[in-house]
Amino acid sequence: MLHRMALRVLPSLSLAVTEGSVRKRKRIVMFVPGLVAFAVYRLAKLLVPLSEPIVLLAVSGLVSLVTALLAYRVGRAVPWANILREDGGRVLTWLGGWIGFVYGVQLSLLVLALLWLVGYDYLKHPDGPAMMAIIIACTSVARDAFEIGHVQKIARMGRPFPTFPDGAALRAMVSSHAMECGPWVAVGLVVGALGASLGHLVEASQWAALIQLSAVALLGGAVALCAYFGGLRPKRSWTQGLLQTKAGELLKYWWWPGLSFSATYYLVAAGIVIFLLKQPGISTAYAMAVGGLVTGMMALYCYYLGFRRQVEEQQGQTMSSALLRCPFVMGILGKSTSSGVSITAGSSSKV
């Protein structure tokens, strides 16, 4: 889900995909696949046992794979022949495999785990959760693939982006700045594991899972926020950025993507434990392992987002008021000064 965070956190990408005309097209792109996904669900229900988690996830992944490619084609707004010639097989493989199949499976697990947490167990009542898992995954994949296609379209028209949301820049940063981001990952591993261990205080599996989720989300959001400032100003103290940012703005940054995606990743992992490993709940051992992994990963991702935000500043990327729609960079749009980061006003985000 790093691509999703990059599309909203990095100013150049956020500006490209949140323009009014793009949002209007995106709503249609999300609506149509949702209807198709419902029809596919009704057909698949007659042909395959969707009450089996593996079968459901396979169907969801395949539907999402096709959706990703078609939505990308709409975003690119050129014939398939041009896409194959200009983008090549690597981009399409990544798009179909990662943004389509893998991301679709993750979103389906998220839906199933969230419904389980509120008492609507897919294993006991498969129809409703199965339908929602396929439709929600399909529409979300369509949205993101369309946005990536639009970014690629603009890039091919001569407006290059410092960061393309395929993870290549993350791998480059890890290889060249491992010593800088490594401590953040280590802190995330420890903090997440300790937070998730609080679930042992209760015996009921769903209540324990709720405590584990809350602890990982809250602490993961805090670590992610600090890591972002660490990547944003790697040669300065990360506490400087925190102290110079208003409390209200920090709360927004902590909420999204920190807390939101920490909770999302934890629920995906919970779905794996409950529906694929067929555990009745999430034991303390599983919770600590997952909590550490999620928080460590969020620390790495948010350090990376801060690092790439700094790269855009150094390259002189222009910023406009449209960026105020981006939830995480609200307020951190000021110019670099000798004393730190200046803050501007923010506003609520839009899809």
Image (cartoon, rainbow, N blue to C red):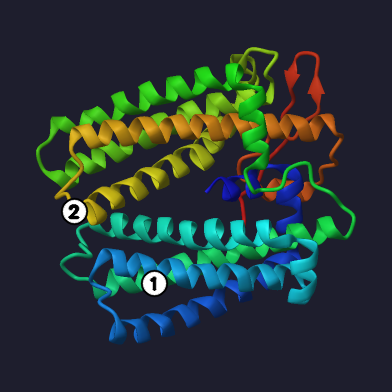
* Rendering coords of residue 135 (x, y %): 43, 72
User: Type of residue at label 2?
Assistant: Lys
The residue pinned by badge 2 equals 278
The residue lying at 60 percent from left, 49 percent from top is 3
* Rendering coords of residue 107 (x, y %): 42, 58
* Rendering coords of residue 236 (x, y %): 68, 13
Within 10 Å of disc 1 (Cα), the crowding (few <14, some 14-19, many 20+) is many
Label 1 sits on a secondary structure element that is helix
Which image quarter holds the C terminus? bottom right
Up/down of 244 relative to 24, above or below: above
Q: Closer to the camera, 69 or 340?
A: 69
Up/down of 320 relative to 151, above or below: above
Q: Earlier in the sequence, mark 1 or mark 2?
A: 1
Residue 59 — which label?
1
Apparent side of residue 36 relative to residue 246 in the rendered image (left or right):
left
Q: Closer to the camera, 20 or 3?
A: 3
Task: Tell me where residue 178 sits by quadrant.
Answer: top right
Q: Closer to the camera, 345 or 163?
A: 163
Task: Tell me where residue 6 sits by quadrant.
Answer: top right
